[in-house]
């Protein structure tokens, strides 16, 4: 399982996470939703080990591997809903 144990993360003086604890068990899926700027991408950077917490531990099983696909979406005049529904 992936565990975040009492994570604190700051960007400058701004505290993004304070005493965050989270567990994702093997075979389970997790989703993260929220407004822009609340830390979703930053949380994923912790998962990817691109950021280290100021305090706390991130615990990974040695056998786990993470694969990520970087992508960008070209700007479009279409409505976001239509764009997503055409995503097949």
Image (tube, rainbow, N blue to C red):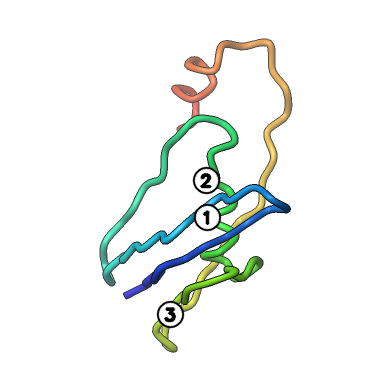
- Viewer-nearest residue: 52 or 87: 52
What residue is at 44 percent from the left and 22 percent from the top?
85
Report which residue position mark 1 lands on. Answer: 43
First in residue order: circle 1 vs circle 3: 1
Q: Real-space Cα distance between discs 1 and 3? A: 15 Å
Q: Is residue 21 left or right of residue 79?
A: left
In the rendered image, which residue does mark 3 sit on?
60
| Callouts 1 and 2 close, C-beta under 8 Å | yes
Q: Position of residue 69 (x, y in %)?
A: 61, 56
Q: Secondary structure at mark 3?
A: loop
Closer to the camera in the image, 69 or 8: 8
- Give residue 63's quadrant in the image: bottom left
Label number found at residue 40? 2
Residue 8 in the image: x percent, y percent?
Answer: 52, 63
Q: Nearer the viewer, residue 74 or 14?
A: 14
Compared across the picture, whether 18 is left or right of 74 comes to left
Numbered circle sitting on residue 62? none
Give above or below for 2 relative to 79.
Answer: below
Q: Residue at x 59, y 52 (%)?
A: 42
Q: How many marks are shown on the rendered structure?
A: 3
């Amino acid at each position: 399982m992936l565990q975040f144990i009492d994570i604190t993360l700051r960007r400058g003086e701004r505290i993004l996470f304070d005493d965050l604890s989270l567990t994702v068990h093997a075979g389970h899926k997790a989703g993260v939703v929220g407004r822009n700027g609340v830390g979703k991408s930053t949380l994923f950077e912790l998962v990817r080990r691109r950021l280290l917490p100021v305090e706390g531990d991130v615990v990974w099983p040695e056998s786990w591997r993470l694969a990520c696909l970087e992508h960008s979406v070209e700007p479009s005049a279409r409505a976001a809903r239509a764009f997503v529904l055409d995503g097949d």
